[in-house]
Image (cartoon, grey):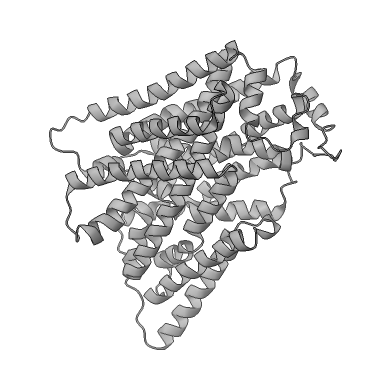
Amino acid sequence: MSSIQITALVIILLYMAATVALGLFVSSRKKSKEAQSNDDFLMASKSLGPVVLAGTLFAANTGGASTTGIATNVYTYGLSASWYVIAAGIGFVLVAQIAPFFRKAQANTVPEIISKRYGKASHIFTAFTSIAALFLATGAQIIATASVINVVTGLEFDIAAVITTIVVIAYTMVGGFKSVTAANLMHVLFITVGMTIALFIMIANPQVGGFGELFAKAETITGAQGESLDLLSMTKIGLPTIIGYIAMYYMTFPTGQEIVQTFCSAKDGKAAMTGSILAGVVSAVYAIVPALIGLIAYTCIDGYALAGAQKNALAEATIRFAPSIVAGLVLAAIVAATMSSASGNMIGTATMFTNDVFVPYINKGVKDDKKEVWISRVTMVVVGAVGLVVALVASNVISVMMGAFALRSAGPFAAFICGLFYKNVTQRAGFISIVAGTVVAAIWIYGLNTPWGLSAMVPGGIVAFVVIFVVSKIERSSGVPAAPEIKFEED
């Protein structure tokens, strides 16, 4: 390894060690001598203020797809690849209007909220599709982290993936959601400030020559067939894809456990709303940073664009054009992003399995905090193991994440919205719409290969809404009673 690679590796390892140490520190600060409750472990005692909540939301959503994935896709879509994260920012702002309902619903998981109106069948189906989606999402984060380690060290991807999985499991298991939220504040600093500073240092490198020279050269870059790559375009990705991204985030945030769990952990509804807006603004502003680093890779590394899309574009550009310490910091920022998202996925899966499977169906409704904390930790290990398998058999981070988002949200979103605001919805209509939306999304992705680049969330969501209104109307006209309304607590 070169001196730059060695320095970068040392910084990344120190960062990983600091993350685990922070988890141990936060866990050891619990002053009460009583046993830690599962609510403490998984929900941070529902005490998050708007700033901490915003940082946790941003870090949970800004993972491998939002860093290495964007840089990779600059080859295909130019700077318009950044719309993947700009759309997330828009999604957070839109969802802010309904964020307080999560905190007021007196629930900890998406399936639990669904079950309050639609009953057992909807509860079970939503729980298992949401858990399966988080397995995929965890795998995507492992892919991103392992690809960085692979570039820095030359270590085989498979071995790097195993190391990543062990570290994420360790720090997530140690202190639960409190340690994760504490670590996320550190992650956000590295992701936003660290990566942005590194970008400007790379731009100033004589081999890059500043923004003017970078943009001028980018206009001349061609692919293997001599075609113009149009790397500076902010529209190449296409309006259907942009609309699909916004729809995807607007639908997946209210139905994604790692996001909903953060909203539910807010100290009150106002904190949930403010935190969501703050997270949206930070996401939208940050989006261009990894895209510009990807642009540097495809523009300034000789022959790099001729080989097609490169999953290590962000890491390669950083290693080549940043000083060793800066390279280590920016790569640590990527590790921060992917580790924070992976830990959020693990916490979310543990919460759903414990609250929606173990307690009601395995433990027959009996609450036992000691046993539940133990089950939650075991679940985290399982999530990490399955995520590792996903990472070893898949490669495109954004493709894996898009599939995960669609499968968990296309069906439940309509049921969730109608559950909050539509008095005449029926239980059977809710269940049928959840299944119909999920099936349509799966067919759209795996059967039709995502036509026009439009997210499966759009057709799946439309079908789910049509089904829930039509079936509810038919049932209500036949005398079937509406599903019981959700009771919300006051702040």
Left or right, 100 with reference to 246:
left
Q: How many marks?
A: 0
Q: Nearer the viewer, residue 63 or 45?
A: 63
Left-right relation of 283 to 78? left
Q: Residue at x 51, y 61 (%)?
A: 410
Q: State whether residue 413 is above or below residue 60.
A: below
Q: Is residue 232 left or right of residue 345?
A: right
* Vertical placement of residue 205 versus 271, above or below: above
What residue lies at 57% left-to-right and 39% top-to-bottom? 66
Tell me residue 260's x, y (percent). Answer: 40, 50
Residue 264 visible: no
Q: What residue do we see at 39% from left, 58% from top?
A: 128
**Residue 449: image x %, image y %?**
65, 58
Farthest residue toward the left? 33
Quadrant (top left, top right, bottom left, bottom right) of the N terminus: top right
Left or right: residue 307 versus residue 286 is right
Residue at (39%, 76%) from the top-left corner? Answer: 428
Q: Nearer the viewer, residue 269 or 134?
A: 134
